[in-house]
């Protein structure tokens, strides 16, 4: 039986697929937990995949 596979998604060239990172703020809160923020890749908005750009109509040869 044939299995249909989806083509592999394109990995974002800006973050190489690692779209989110937890960055420590350098201190701890009252409970002793590290204070962190989550930073997302601005190019792919945290998805890790690059979107295919649609063909422009004015780029015809």
Image: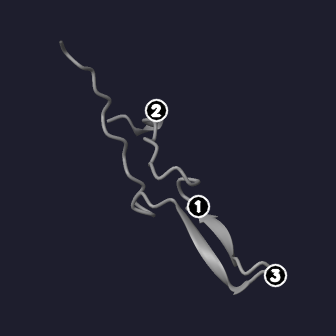
User: What residue is shown at x 45% (from left), y 41% (from top)?
Assistant: 53
Residue 19: image tag: none
Q: CA distance from mark 2 to mark 1?
A: 27 Å
Query: Mark 1 = which residue?
Result: 42
Q: Identify the image quadrant of the N terminus.
A: top left
Residues packed near mark 3 inside 10 Å, few (<14), some (14 to 19) or many (20 plus):
few
Residue 29 vs 46, above or below: the answer is below
Q: Is residue 11 left or right of residue 41?
A: left
Tell me where residue 26 sits by quadrant: bottom right
Q: CA distance from mark 1 to mark 3?
A: 32 Å
Q: Is residue 21 left or right of residue 1?
A: right
Query: Mark 2 = which residue?
Result: 57
Residues packed near mark 2 inside 10 Å, few (<14), some (14 to 19) or many (20 plus):
few
x, y percent for residue 7: 30, 34
Q: Please report whichever mark, 2 or 1, sits nearer to the chain's N-terminal start.
A: 1
Query: Mark 3 = which residue?
Result: 30
């Amino acid at each position: 039986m044939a299995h249909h596979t989806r083509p592999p998604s394109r990995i974002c060239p800006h973050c190489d697929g690692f779209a989110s990172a937890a960055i420590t703020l350098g201190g701890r809160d009252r409970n002793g937990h590290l204070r962190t923020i989550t930073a997302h890749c601005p190019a792919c908005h945290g998805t890790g995949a690059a979107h295919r750009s649609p063909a422009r109509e004015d780029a015809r040869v």
